[in-house]
Amino acid sequence: MQHQFPKNFWWGSASSATQTEGAAFEDGKGENIWDHWYKTQPNRFFGDVSATDASTFYQHYRSDIALMKEIGHNSFRTSISWSRLIPNGCGEVNPKAVEFYNNVIDEMLAQGIEPFINLFHFDMPMAMQEIGGWESRKVVEAYTEFAATCFELFGDRVKYWFTFNEPIVPVEGGYLYDFHYPNVVDFGRAVTVGYHTMLAHAKAVAKYRQYQQKNQQQEGQIGIILNLTPSYPRSQNPADLKAANIADLLFNRSFLDPSVTGEFPQGLVDLLTEHGQMPVCETGDREIIAAGKVDILGVNYYQPRRVKARLTAVDTNGPFMPEWFFENYEMPGRKMNPHRGWEIYEKGIYDIMTNLRENYGNIPCFISENGMGVEGEDKFLKDGQIQDTYRIEFIQDHLSWLHKAIQEGSDCRGYHLWTFIDNWSWNNAYKNRYGFYSLDLATQTRTKKLSGEWFAEVSKNNGF
Ligand code: BGP
């Protein structure tokens, strides 16, 4: 065995409620922004496919959990749909949802699979969006109550909680780059959304601390899941370094620093102040954020961000955007995933771990998403099975770098692939397939890919 991982390493995968449950309009679930947006603009979704039916986890959770076990999962992350649990975002709790999530959690535990539960994966209840979404402090309060409700209902069994998955993505998608509802392009509003998300995170952490005290639950942990895409400068030229530093401040450190150290980076505050983009901060916010430090960090990593100093002058008539400070850089000869159009840079995972070890007190962490999307994966079908050797290689190469980081002292406790069964993915719907199991959309049949068989061995041997 070349790569032996630490004892009790978490082997599993990740998904989210909206992307897997389906039953979007059943059993009292309220509408979320995805249900709403699809109704108004179905063409914004690949193949006009909505999340309404997703991959039917709502019906098939029991057999799906058995499939997890079959390929060696000892842990699995999904989320609780806010609009399923509390259809209007605040107020009444939906008993059918309580029953469903109880069943899922109990079944996972019965199968020896540790549930990792996330509270927000891009799926704002529509009733909350209508009153301003993350631009509104009322929504921050509603989310905090939703989180507290989840701790009360499920905290006796769930020991790993996460407040948000990739909180920067709704900021980018919904308020800067037009790939999430509400399709706003406004930097100031984007900053407010990010700031309020961070407040909501910290308030949920505070609720969990209260819950722990009240119930003497010492062993539970709460964290956040961040997509820590490293920003690599084109060169060591000071202008390129500055460009990379600003991209890092805006897209990584905006959430990483407050989650781990309890404070926003001064460089970010200076940048926003200089450009008149600071959000409205209220008295007491700083203390709330300082108390929101996490126990554990989930790290999502798919591809690096490469940037260079801008080559052209900014058009000051256009909206103020992050790209005023940098341009994306296409490094010649970069290794690509030709099936998804993303760069593959395995060492990125090691660089993230090193950064966390050296600059963030070696916070306990795990890889909460990593994976390889493949469009048209059917072309690799042979004898009824997807022969995804490219995915095995992809995982192996990333795990090798992760292993090296662990050997050098990084406190990384697990690896979750995105994803378990090919699932629905926001704008891309079923375009890119990521799962250990392939999904036949017409029949909902799940079939183990070669990577699923391979992963079962890795988990059994705790390495490869
Ligand atoms: C991550 C998200 C997941 C999933 C994944 C794949 O950023 O957390 O929810 O969507 O990306 O994305 P895609 O299908 O667009 O390749």
Image (cartoon, rainbow, N blue to C red):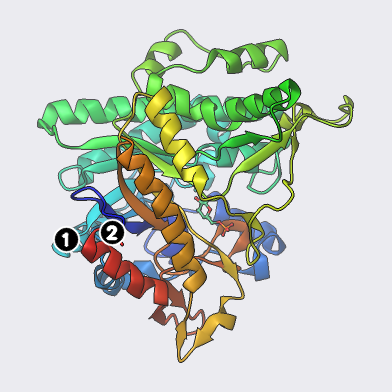
User: How many other residues sit within 10 Å of disc 1, few (<14), some (14-19) or many (≥20)?
Assistant: few
Identified at 13% across, 27% down, the residue is: 214
Query: Do we see residue 423 in this rendering?
Result: no
Across and down, in percent, residue 1 comes to: 26, 61
Across and down, in percent, residue 331 comes to: 72, 46
Q: CA distance from mark 1 to mark 2?
A: 19 Å
- Name of the residue lying farthest toward the bottom: 383
Label annotation for residue 112: 1
Identified at 35% across, 52% down, the residue is: 415
Q: Is residue 113 above or below residue 258?
A: below
For disc 2, the marked residue is: 463
Q: Nearer the viewer, residue 113 or 177?
A: 113
Q: From the viewer's perspective, is the residue at label 1 or at label 2 nearer? A: 2
Classify mark 2 as within 8 Å of ligand 1 or not, answering yes or no.
no
Across and down, in percent, residue 312 comes to: 89, 31
Q: Is residue 282 above or below residue 145?
A: above
Q: Quadrant of residue 272?
A: top right
Across and down, in percent, residue 423 comes to: 48, 66
For badge 2, the amino acid type reads Gly
- Name of the residue lying farthest toward the left: 216
> Horizontally, is 358 left or right of 428 in the view?
left
Q: Nearer the viewer, residue 112 or 208?
A: 112
Identified at 40% across, 71% down, the residue is: 451
Classify mark 1 as within 8 Å of ligand 1 or not, answering yes or no.
no
For badge 1, the amino acid type reads Gly
